[in-house]
Image (cartoon, rainbow, N blue to C red):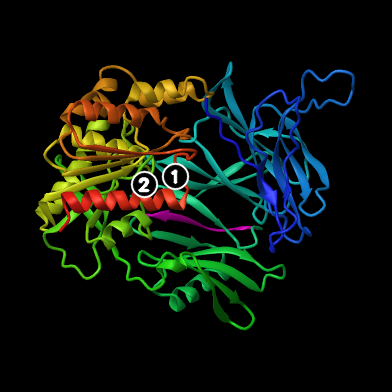
Amino acid sequence: MLVGYSRLIAINRDGSALKQLGQSSSFYDAGIRQDDGTIIDWMPGGGGSVLMAREYIPEAGKTGTRFSRSKQGLGVDRVDTQSLAVSSIEAPRQYVSGYLTDGRGSVRMMALAGVDGQMLTGKTKYEYRTVGSRDWKSLTDYVTDDDFEPLEVDATSDSLYALKPLNARKALYRIKLTDTPTEELVASNPTVDIDQVVRSANGERVIGYSYAVDKREVVYFDPEYKTLASSLGQALSNLPLVQFESTSADGNKVLLFAGSDNDPGRYYIFDKKSKTLGELMLARPELEKRTLASVKSVQVQASDGAMIPAYLTLPPGKEAKNLPAVVLPHGGPSSRDEWGFDWLAQYLASRGYAVLQPNYRGSAGFGDAWLVENGFKSWRTSIGDITASARWLVKQGIADGDRLAVVGWSYGGYAALQSAATDPQLFKAVVAIAPVTDLTMLKDEAKDYTNSDLVAQFIGSGPQIVEASPLRHAASIKSPVLLVHGDMDQNVGVAESEKMEAALRAAGTQVQFLRYKGLDHQLDDSNARIEMLTKMGDLLDHTIGH
């Protein structure tokens, strides 16, 4: 049974004095310490201290001493990142799943996870505090994220910004955290969900909100940042994706990131007093001298007439005519692609392939109707949109119908395999990275975890469990397949790819399996990714390339 863990550290900028910020482990710990916790407030002007939500594990079986730890649950501590001096802000409590501060050191919100026995219910209860009070007051009953999603607390307006449904999409509301909370609508969009708020570079206040239709847009309601963003937009007109990352202690110097579709991004320092902008560093310096592909938003017509939003990446210097092409569905399935730099799409485009990334039905961010039940329960619709995207490329004259491939990661890998199983003649090559291959296996993998019931509900039951599992239809896949999986994957067990490889070999289908020891779902290892991309490039070159 795989259990993930992380450790939070402080380290000097010269690499010295590495220190762990979490509670020290003990031989007598009564449970598994998965996480130290998270920084919930950077405490501007706090002299190196931060507020940290810390996970406390009690001790058990410790005899001969009265000094055993009994605290349990998630609490909040003020931690000096240099001396490691700790002062308790919120005593740890069981079933607390998170806290929100106002960005100025005050804890104002607490989330309580719904639990049935040992199983998570997928619902959360939220409590809040009024200014200056230590008493918790109820804000909601137990609700799902679809019903209520708190984002940030703003001290300036003494409000919580939260997402709630409006006209089957997520809208942004401002809720006054007074004795009797009142709410007002801040923003909604008729096409997509509002999905984020934006904080000032020092983290002290909420300055705007964000959403993505074609490109991500930020609406600033803070006059200073609205003016600054407009000025930077003119100075960095070729880098429209701008994010304010941090600020100096006196607020004069602002660290910002700016990127685009064909630029992976650069960090700049803006000096407010001198009105100067200086480039600090590149996000991906190895790509600085390379010509990268441009990305444009397109609309793909599905078989039932629905218009699927998608992103088309064309190889630099190539005419968009009769090209070999790759359909690249995103993972999730409750996720979405956005306009911007995508390293996998750029790699494929650099080798001469047109790349299409459809936000198929089942994708998040476009409202309830687009989300359908989800990409597993409504798999016929989701997979139908993906195969329709391939045919659209051919109909538009962009792609050669005899040179189409499909590549995907996670649910995208599942979609690649399921598309090849349901439409065997369409794609000439299939690449599935960390793919779901069997829905029964996916449910079984969750059985020993607290989210087991939630996974089972999401996947569903009935005939679709067999119908929607590419492993059960491996004999229908006729094109060569490349499978890639890490053996420490907690999202999708490596056994799913192992069984898929065996089934494809038994059916006489050409298959190659890259199994990476010690890597998880993201395959965060440069050598592994280099090999994966090289093998992917070889397969595509031999099947649909020049």
The residue at 38%/45% (across/down) is 365
Examine the structure image and report whether residue 189 is included in the region drawn in magenta. no
What is the quadrant of residue 292 in the picture?
bottom left
Above or below residue 156? Residue 466 is above
Front of the two marks 2 and 1: 1
Closest to the observer, 436 or 143: 436
Magenta residues, start to end = 205-212
Whether residue 190 sits left or right of residue 281 in the image: it is left
Q: Which mark is residue 523?
A: 1
The answer to whether residue 101 of the structure is visible from this angle is no
Indicate the position of residue 375 as horizontal and vertical percent values.
31, 34
Q: Position of residue 13 (x, y in %)?
A: 69, 63
Q: Residue at x 40, y 22 (%)?
A: 443
Question: Which quadrant is the C terminus positioned in?
Answer: bottom left
- Answer whether residue 208 is magenta in the image: yes
Secondary element at image label 1: loop
Check disc 2 and report the residue beneath it.
336
Residue at coordinates 26% horizontally, 39% vertically from top-left? 416
Tell me: residue 68, above or below residue 482: above
Q: Where residue 74 sits in the image (x, y, percent)?
A: 69, 34
Give residue 214's quadrant in the image: bottom left
Q: Secondary structure at mark 2?
A: loop
Q: What distance separates the C-alpha of mark 2 from that of mark 1?
A: 20 Å
